[in-house]
Image (tube, rainbow, N blue to C red):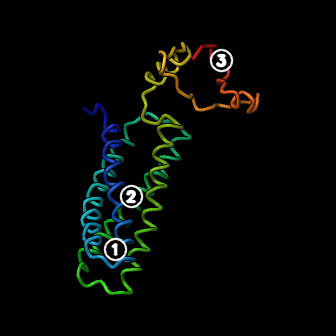
Amino acid sequence: MWQTIAEAHAALNDLPAALLVAAVFFEALGLLTKREGLRTAAFWMLVAGAVGAIAAVVSGLRAANVIEHGGASHMVMERHRTLAITTTVIFVLLAGWRIARRDAMGRKERPAFVGAALLGALLLFYVGHLGGSLVFRYGAGVPTTTLEAALADREGGHEHAPGEEHDHGGVVDSAGAAGQASGEHSHAPGTPPHQH
C-alpha cells in the first residue's frame, strides 16, 4: 500500500483535517441554531480529528527526516512542521476543553470556544496549503530519480485518444494571453514541440 512514510503521511492528513473542519462547522451551526444534536456530532468529530491529527503529525515528523528535498523546500517544511504541531496542540486543547465541559459549557463560554475553533480551522487550511506546496511546487518527498523520469516523460510529449483531451492549465508565458484565449498554451523553455 504505502511504500514510504511520506506516502503514509499524505494519506493520514486528509481525514483528520476534514473531521476538524466539519467539527468547527457543526459547532458553529449548533451555537447559532441551539441544536444539541449538531454539537454532539461536532464533539465526536473533534475528538476523532484531534486523535487523527496526532497521527498525521507523528508521521510527518518521521517523513521530514527521510524525504529528499532542497534548500527552498526546507524552509517551507520547517514552517509547515511548526504550524502543524501548533494546530494539533490547539485542537487537542479544544477537544480537552469540550470533554471537560461537555454538558456544563455556558452561554458566554460557547462563543469563545467556537471563536478559538475557527482560528484553529483557518490555521489548519494554511498548514494544508504549505504541505501541498511542498509536494506540488517544490517536489519535496519525490525521489530525484522519479523527478528525472517524470521530466524525461514530459519532454517526450504525449498523445490523447479521441475524447480524452484536457486542458493543460492554460500556461501563459511572455507571449501573453493571446494563446490562452485561442485555447493554445506554451511550455517552459526546452520543452520539445508536441501535439495534443
Give me the C-alpha separation between circle 2 and circle 3: 41 Å
Q: Nearer the viewer, residue 175 or 90?
A: 175
Question: Dot 3: within a 10 Å radius of its alpha carbon, few (fewer than 14), some, or many (20 or more) residues?
Answer: few
Give me the C-alpha separation between circle 3 and circle 1: 56 Å
Q: Is residue 100 above or below residue 136?
A: below
- Mark 2 or mark 3, which is nearer to you? 3
Sooner in the amino-acid sequence: mark 3 or mark 1: 1
Looking at the figure, which quarter contains the C terminus? top right
Q: Residue at x 43, y 31 (%)?
A: 142
Q: Residue at x 46, y 55 (%)?
A: 125
Name the residue type under label 3: Gly
Q: Secondary structure at mark 3?
A: loop
Q: Position of residue 171 (x, y in %)?
A: 64, 31
Sooner in the amino-acid sequence: mark 2 or mark 3: 2
The residue that mark 2 highlights is: 85
Name the residue type under label 2: Ile
The residue that mark 1 highlights is: 30
Q: Residue at x 36, y 77 (%)?
A: 33
Name the residue type under label 1: Gly
Question: Dot 2: within a 10 Å radius of its alpha carbon, few (fewer than 14), some, or many (20 or more) residues?
Answer: some
Sooner in the amino-acid sequence: mark 2 or mark 1: 1
Give me the C-alpha separation between circle 2 and circle 1: 28 Å
Q: Secondary structure at mark 1?
A: helix
Q: Is residue 20 above or below residue 99?
A: above
Q: Secondary structure at mark 2?
A: helix
Which mark, by number, is residue 190? 3
- Mark 3 or mark 1, which is nearer to you? 1
Q: Determine whether, in the image, residue 4 is placed left or right of residue 132.
A: left
Dots 2, 1 in contact, CB < 8 A = no
Q: Position of residue 191 (x, y in %)?
A: 62, 18
